[in-house]
Image (cartoon, rainbow, N blue to C red):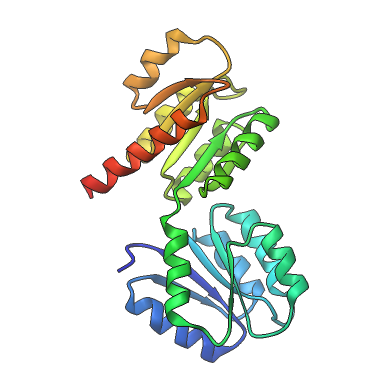
């Protein structure tokens, strides 16, 4: 059973909406239904969604355009495209722009659940760094490892996202304008103590290491860091959380 998983289903076919609503509610998902892309965008502005099932071919605003708007509002949402039509170009663009998968109608329900649950098993990570090149490079590496990744350019942007998603790990740079990483760590831990925070820096900041660890950071890594070490820290933290659950 899914616990507190917010699912948005977007389809102009009412029967499809009803069928999927029944199937996922029986599995414990918290389901929201949208009959068109405009309603989906409005829902995304008001509520965080873990998963979005998005029909491709819809009147008014199609699934690709809606996908772009929803991902802009909620970057951490996993979007799975649905189609019963031959719209390969739209699907190709959606996948290139970050759609997680494509499901074809009529649905194979077992495959649909496997796809949704497979996406939810992927750790959700936020990379917070004011240096564009650093955060984008780290993002690409983490995505290639199979993680879901969201980026933030500073502490304030990161804090605005923390209440909206269940982040497993936050990679937090120490030296940033406006709000440094140590202050951001304090706020993050106050908002969600269960989130694992890994501090990172390109500078020698030994005086901050002890403070970061006392504030609840999992580790303090110096750039450029050993990615194997990072993956090991993430995996060990997730295993510990599973044991606790």
The correct choice, above or below, for 41 with respect to 217 in the image is: below
Residue 208, x across and y down, in percent: 44, 13
Q: Nearer the viewer, residue 184 or 99?
A: 99
The correct choice, above or below, for 225 with respect to 93 in the image is: above
Residue at 43% of width from left, 73% of height from top?
113
Q: Quadrant of residue 176?
A: top right
The correct choice, above or below, for 130 with respect to 82 in the image is: above
Q: Does the rendering let one see residue 174?
A: no
Residue at 35% of width from left, 21% of height from top?
213
Residue 94, x across and y down, in percent: 69, 64
Q: Does the rendering let one see residue 67?
A: yes
Residue lying furthest left in this view?
Answer: 244
Residue 55, x across and y down, in percent: 62, 77
* Left-right relation of 213 to 46: left
Q: Nearer the viewer, residue 67 or 233?
A: 233
Residue 141, x across and y down, in percent: 59, 39
Q: Quadrant of residue 136?
A: top right
Name the quadrant of the N terminus: bottom left
Q: Quadrant of residue 91?
A: bottom right
Q: Nearer the viewer, residue 211 or 147?
A: 147
């Amino acid at each position: 059973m899914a616990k507190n998983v917010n699912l948005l289903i977007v389809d102009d076919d009412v029967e499809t909406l009803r069928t999927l609503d029944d199937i996922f509610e029986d599995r414990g998902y918290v389901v929201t239904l949208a009959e068109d892309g405009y309603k989906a965008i409005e829902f995304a502005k008001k509520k965080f969604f873990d998963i979005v099932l998005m029909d491709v071919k819809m009147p008014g605003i199609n699934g690709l355009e809606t996908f772009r708007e929803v991902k802009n509002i909620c970057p951490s949402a996993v979007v799975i495209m649905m189609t019963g039509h031959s719209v390969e170009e739209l699907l190709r663009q959606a996948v290139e722009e970050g759609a997680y998968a494509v499901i074809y109608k009529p649905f194979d329900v077992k495959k649909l659940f496997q796809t949704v649950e497979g996406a939810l098993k992927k750790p959700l990570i936020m990379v917070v760094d004011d240096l564009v090149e650093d955060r984008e490079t780290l993002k690409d590496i983490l995505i290639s490892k199979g993680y879901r990744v969201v980026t933030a350019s500073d502490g304030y942007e990161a804090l605005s996202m923390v209440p909206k998603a269940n982040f497993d790990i936050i990679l937090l740079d120490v030296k940033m304008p406006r709000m440094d990483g140590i202050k951001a760590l304090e706020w993050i831990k106050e908002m969600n103590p269960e989130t694992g925070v890994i501090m990172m820096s390109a500078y020698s900041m030994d005086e901050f290491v002890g403070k970061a660890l006392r504030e609840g950071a999992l580790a303090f890594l110096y750039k450029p860091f050993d990615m194997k070490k990072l993956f090991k820290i993430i995996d060990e933290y997730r295993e510990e959380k599973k044991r606790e659950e």
